[in-house]
Image: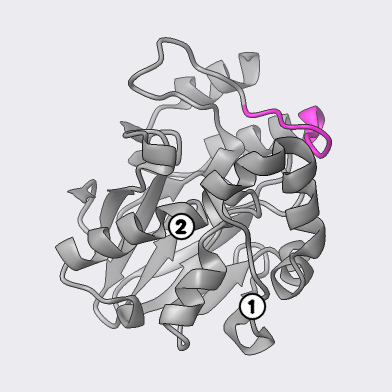
């Protein structure tokens, strides 16, 4: 667990046993906490360990915010809710039906990865009372801390990013490239079949206009805000 701004911690999920590959972000307000992205289901023990390091239990988490449905971001949601039945999943409206019935999502993963799905873990249905969709630019407050949600299609049609207003921090989901410390190249996130290049560019242009101080990426970590970063992303 690493503090990256006044209210935000980076939690390395050690995805598939790899350090600095998939991050989740813990946002702590004066009246609650939110976990933005949660990693694979198989990473959940590490997520719980990270929460303990921050002095929190799963039941202290008001909101889990999967930026999109892909398993490295949302795979652990159903198991987390089993451990904290009061927590609410906040997601894009198009993601709700897949959290209620993840059969299509799981079938797609099995089709691509076969028996390797055992390394990831699959998503189980989540009760409707634990799911809430968010509207674009909607704000949710956890005491002195505000989360604003921005639709970010391109990588996936059901993607949102989270702007933590008081820290001027943008948690990007996969709207930006993979840029892990252990690998020398920046890799655009362009998964078939839902990737839409024009929407991805429009999202990058929209994000570049925000007033932020820090960019927090799932793959991996925080960098200082710079318009040049988004220009480089668009060039990719």
Residue 221 picture quarter: top left
Of 19 and 110, the residue lying toward us: 110
Q: Does the segment drawn in magenta span residue 192? A: yes
Q: Which residues are magenta?
A: 189-199
The residue carrying mark 1 is 126
Residue at 66 percent across and 51 percent down: it is: 159
Residue at 68 percent across and 63 percent down: it is: 92
Q: Is residue 22 visible?
A: no
**Quadrant housing the C terminus:** top right
Asked whether disc 2 touches disc 1, contact meaning CB atoms under 8 Å apart, the reply is no
In the depicted structure, whether residue 119 falls above or below residue 219: below
Percent x, y for residue 53?
16, 61
Q: Does the segment drawn in magenta span residue 41? A: no
Most common secondary structure along the magenta stretch = loop
Percent x, y for residue 104?
82, 58
Secondary structure category for the residue under label 1 = loop
């Amino acid at each position: 667990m690493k503090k990256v701004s006044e209210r935000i911690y980076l939690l390395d999920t050690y995805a598939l046993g790899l350090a600095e590959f998939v991050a989740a972000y813990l946002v702590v307000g004066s009246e609650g906490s939110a976990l933005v992205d949660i990693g694979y289901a198989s990473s959940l023990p590490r997520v719980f360990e990270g929460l303990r390091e921050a002095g929190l239990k799963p039941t202290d988490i008001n909101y889990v915010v999967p930026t999109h449905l892909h398993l490295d971001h949302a795979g652990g949601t159903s198991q987390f809710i089993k451990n904290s039945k009061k927590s609410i999943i906040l997601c894009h409206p198009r993601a709700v039906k897949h959290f209620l019935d993840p059969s299509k999502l799981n079938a797609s993963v099995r089709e691509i990865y076969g028996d390797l799905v055992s390394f990831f873990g699959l998503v189980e249905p989540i009760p409707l009372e634990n799911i809430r969709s968010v509207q674009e630019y909607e704000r949710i407050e956890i005491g002195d801390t505000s989360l604003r949600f921005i639709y970010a299609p391109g990588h996936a049609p059901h993607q949102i990013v989270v702007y933590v207003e008081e820290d001027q921090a943008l948690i990007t989901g996969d709207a930006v490239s993979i840029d892990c410390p252990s690998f020398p190249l920046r890799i655009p996130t362009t998964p078939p079949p839902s990737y839409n290049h024009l929407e991805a560019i429009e999202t990058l242009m929209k994000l570049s206009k925000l007033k932020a101080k820090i960019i927090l990426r799932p793959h991996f970590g925080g960098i200082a805000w710079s318009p040049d970063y988004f220009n480089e992303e668009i060039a990719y």
